[in-house]
Image (spheres, helix red, strand yellow):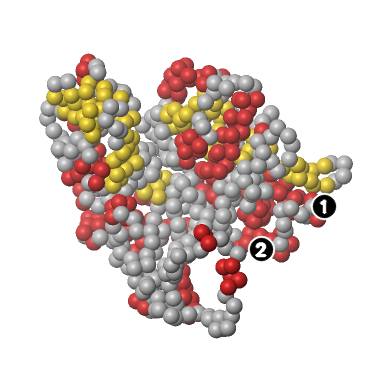
Amino acid sequence: MNRTLYGNLIFELSKKGRKGYSLPHDYDRTHTTAELPQALRRKEAARLPECDELTVVRHYTNLSHNNFGVNDGFYPLGSCTMKYNPVINEEIAAMKAFAGLHPLQPADTCQGALEVYFNLQQSLAELAGLSEFTLNPCAGAHGELTGLMVIRAYHESRRDDARTKVLIPDSAHGTNPASAAVCGLEVVEVHSLADGTVDVDHLRELLADCGSQVAAMMMTNPNTLGIFEPRVLEITELVHAAGGLMYYDGANLNALLGECRPGDMGFDVMHINLHKTFSTPHGGGGPGSGPVGVRQGLESFLPTPRVVFHEEEKQFAVDAPEGALGSIGCFFGNFGVMLKAYAYILTLGRENVKNVGPLATLNANYIKERLRDDFLLPIQGLCKHEVVFDGLADKSTGVTTMDVAKRLLDYGYHAPTIYFPLLFHESLMIEPTENESKETIDAFIDVMHQIAAEAKSDPEMVKSAPHNTPIGRVDDVLAAKHPITTYWKSIEE
Amino acid sequence: MAKFEEGLLYSESHEYIRVEGEFGFIGISDYAQHALGNVVYVDMPEVDDEVTAGEEFGAVESVKAASDLISPVSGTVVEVNEALEDEPELLNKDAFANWIIKVQLSDPAELDELMDVEAYKKVCE
């Protein structure tokens, strides 16, 4: 493909008067804007690019070649669980009987869809060790907010209005404090120990200080460093004793899938990212889905609508009971995503689902042990589904984590997550998932060793990478300070 | 390698304070700017705002991360370094010459809790 010609911005390809299609000259255009109030009509032309259809098609096809997804190659983006999205999921979600449904049609005309919805609620509850799930939230952070609203509604129902604080470890994902703030709750930070796990002594101090004001503690387990919290049972007991609830951020649930359950650790409310743990796409074919589960006694605080099963009539029905949180989005959430997640659970089956967490953990530990010679491993011992390095072991070359990530692009890999978690200055966070073969992982490890060798032999080459991509090293300072989000200069007026 | 400056007091969260009489000039250390990378924005309090020792008074955003600024002392903000609004990268050029806020100290005894340059060097090792 001719990148020079079609790789330009669509605005730069514009030629005044060029069109894909044109309407007949005698076509009556008055009615297209006649109903619009004067105040809403444009005073001047929109300056849209003018191109013929073939140029547009070539331009966007060219752009699509620059994309990189799980279907293109290894995508070890830590904290994101970039699983393979099985084709059967897509086929089932695209079935006309599902895709053609309307959310307002009577329940007796879509019993199959309601059954899938109900069964997924039940399957997630069983996998999580909780009582009931709502599938309505449309993404992970939407789930966090919904979960915190459930917790708040629970405390308010008992007239315990003083509980306005949420304890959050300093290693948490940024969405946790953001969700708490949006929910009108105050964030209190819990310190981490040097190994990245929760400082339980600091938690005790906080609870002694303001335990009666604690609505909940939010935790990710394994935490954002990929380390299982060894004192999780003690933590949930302490918070419960103070009258608070425990919230489980399901971002890293993949590590535990089939091994242990948040409900059994003492968590009361949680969300699951179907687009991580249950193999639905993150982008492109998205959107996301963040079901929220609760333990027994909290079911009545879940949002509506809910799908229930009436035993006597053997019928699935839509229920919106009084007293619940009400609606938190449109209708039932992203049903297409739920179909994919349900297909994933059924194709794996009860036995194979038990292998997910252990295999993801094995892959991450294999990478950890094979790369620890060239990359600095700040936390020893077993990790779970992801491993965090603190940059290259040899700091004398001046080659940073950013440089390593950019050089990986030259070798055809998506870069790992970098500079998160913030606990280390040169974080490089690798999450292989359970899907990858030993050959794929070995090839990646070889490239990482190769880059470490290049950092010694030719540091300037690594520092100026990438060299083989359509766009080289971008100026991220300029992009952060002076972003240009519109482009129309080249269009002739 | 990070530079260190004699005569300043340092906190474990990598802020420094240069004390002149009843006033203190607070900024981030060279080690901190080095760890943050290219700074793109500095979120500063306003004049007359109160700051408290150990509590956040603003934030520094770099291309890598946003980090809270923790005040080493308590007091009242009497001046902010407005040059940082347009040129946050001054922190990368010379972190010690470019303080962030000037504070009138309300409790000079708090200074005893801070580290001298030798003790701070050990924290950065």
Q: Is residue A161 left or right of residue A56?
A: right
Q: Is residue A56 left or right of residue A147?
A: left
Which residue was labeled with disc 2? A94
Q: Is residue A466 above or below residue B5?
A: below
Residue A118 position in % (x across, y down) = 73, 46
Q: Is residue A187 left or right of residue A347?
A: left
Instruction: Name the one closer to the observer, A332 or B45.
Output: B45
Q: Amino acid at mark 2?
A: Ala
Question: Tag 2, which chain?
Answer: A
Crowding near the residue tagged with mark 2, few <14, some 14–19, many ≥20 C-alpha atoms within 10 Å: some
Residue A391 position in % (x across, y down) = 31, 47
Q: Is residue B29 above or below residue A465?
A: above
Residue farthest to the left?
B6
From the image, which quarter does the N terminus of chain B lie in?
Answer: top left
Circle 1 sits in a helix, a strand or a loop, which is it? Answer: helix
Indicate which disc, 2 or 1, sits on the residue closer to the N terminus.
Answer: 2
Q: Residue at x 44, y 49 (%)?
A: A78
Res. B62 in view: yes
Q: Amino acid at mark 1?
A: Asp
* Same-chain status of marks 2 and 1: yes
Q: Residue at x 30, y 27 (%)?
A: B49
Which residue was labeled with disc 1? A108
Q: Which mark is residue A466?
A: none
Residue farthest to the front?
A38
Circle 2 sits in a helix, a strand or a loop, which is it? Answer: loop
Res. A341 in view: no
Residue A487 position in % (x across, y down) = 37, 65
Question: Tag 1, which chain?
Answer: A
